[in-house]
Image (spheres, helix red, strand yellow):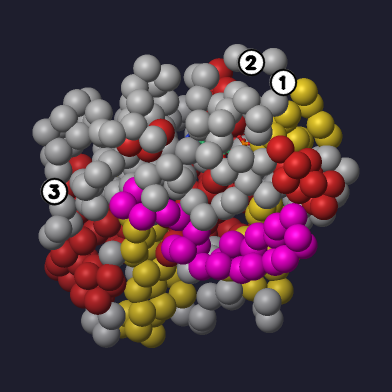
Amino acid sequence: MNNFSWYNAKSIEDALTQVNSTASNEIYRQTEKAAILKAGGTDLLDLMKEGLLQPKTIVNIRELPGLDKIEFSNNDGLRVGANSTLAEIAAHEDIRKHYIAFAQAAGDAATPQLRNMATIGGNIAQRTRCWYFRSYDHPCFRKGGDRCFAKNGENENHAILNNGSCVSVHASSVSTALMAYDARVVIVNSKNETKEIPIADFFVAPGEDPLRETILEADEIITHIRLAKPASGTKAAYIKQGARESHDWSIADVAVVLEMNGKTCKRAAIALGAASPVPLRSMRAEGALAGNQITHEIALEAATLAMERARPLAKNGYKVPLFINLIQEAILNAS
Ligand SMILES: Cc1cc2nc3c(=O)[nH]c(=O)nc-3n(C[C@H](O)[C@H](O)[C@H](O)COP(=O)(O)OP(=O)(O)OC[C@H]3O[C@@H](n4cnc5c(N)ncnc54)[C@H](O)[C@@H]3O)c2cc1C
């Protein structure tokens, strides 16, 4: 790991001034110059130990006042400060009551120790855990190289959908639930401009820009995430499958949010994690449920449709039946 200086930011403006003065958006190539934000540090420190990031300054935003608030109201829905930890989200009464799939996704991530450190802002901004991306010795497409080593290599954890130029999957399984709830990400920049964007537009597919996984610029901070109050009759479920019960990322995870009218589904949102390079909504599966009663058969039909365009790689064919089972189970659990 390189030597670096440590700066405790006093406010959001102060943090953004620090990163703006030395910022580089191409941090993986101009590593020496950059300052970078740190929240819980659970991903950032790994990237530094792996030699992928060598920031000159770490700007600590973990203690910034106000960024860890979680608030719910019937009018405005949920507002989760970027520094809220996964443990706080998993245990929060209003989140468990109104957004159970979000609470489940946060509670199923990583380990108890990590969930106490890991923040939701850092979670959605974390980098892929593809082992070739994480290896200093593999100049892959995502790091500005000219190929994807996983495509014809060790690809058992990798993408089965949209797996063109890069077959990595996004590491945030919590984002799967956020996608199903149509969450919005609120970001402020060093010019004090604020923008609020749908979570689906927050992620960047490798085909759009291989060097980034999110739209975040170096001089931007996520301040909070917003979720609208669910319509009455909303039910939800989340399931994560990892290679191990704990201490592991997802190899397949599913979040389902159903707006029900009695036994009939008025509207469905079905999000898949670890299926493609960015978290994904399956419009095909959602279309199969809308207007129908939820039965075993219709849940299986929706799950099969979600995998219709799957193109597994040499070592991850198992993910197709796994996803079909998880999607069917999540739909039935939610309904
Ligand atoms: C063993 C292990 C298992 C794991 N399993 C899972 C899992 O199952 N599911 C899952 O979703 N995750 C999993 N994780 C990932 C973990 O949840 C993330 O590392 C964590 O959420 C990142 O949050 P952090 O606060 O530590 O971010 P940091 O490491 O501090 O930051 C990560 C990135 O986000 C940026 N950042 C942080 N906060 C902000 C902000 N407010 N605005 C702008 N940029 C910001 C930083 O600059 C950095 O680039 C696992 C991690 C480990 C080590």
Q: Amino acid at mark 2?
A: Asn
Q: Which badge, 1 or 3, comes first in the chain's sequence?
A: 1
Ligand 1 within 8 Å of the CB at mark 3: no
Write the start and end of the magenta stretch as one range.
Answer: 184-208
Q: Nearer the viewer, residue 68 or 150?
A: 150
The residue under label 1 is 4
Q: Amino acid at mark 3?
A: Arg
Q: Quadrant of the N terminus?
A: top right
Whether label 1 touches label 2, CB < 8 Å: yes
**Residue 241 visible, this orientation:** no
Q: Which mark is residue 2?
A: 2
Q: CA distance from mark 1 to mark 2?
A: 6 Å
Q: Amino acid at mark 1?
A: Phe
Q: CA distance from mark 1 to mark 3?
A: 43 Å
Is 201 included in the stretch rendered in magenta?
yes
Question: Furthest residue to the right?
Answer: 10
Q: Nearer the viewer, residue 99 or 213?
A: 213
- Horizontal arrangement in the rendering, residue 14 relative to residue 266 (left or right): right
Q: How many marks do you count on the picture?
A: 3
The residue under label 3 is 311
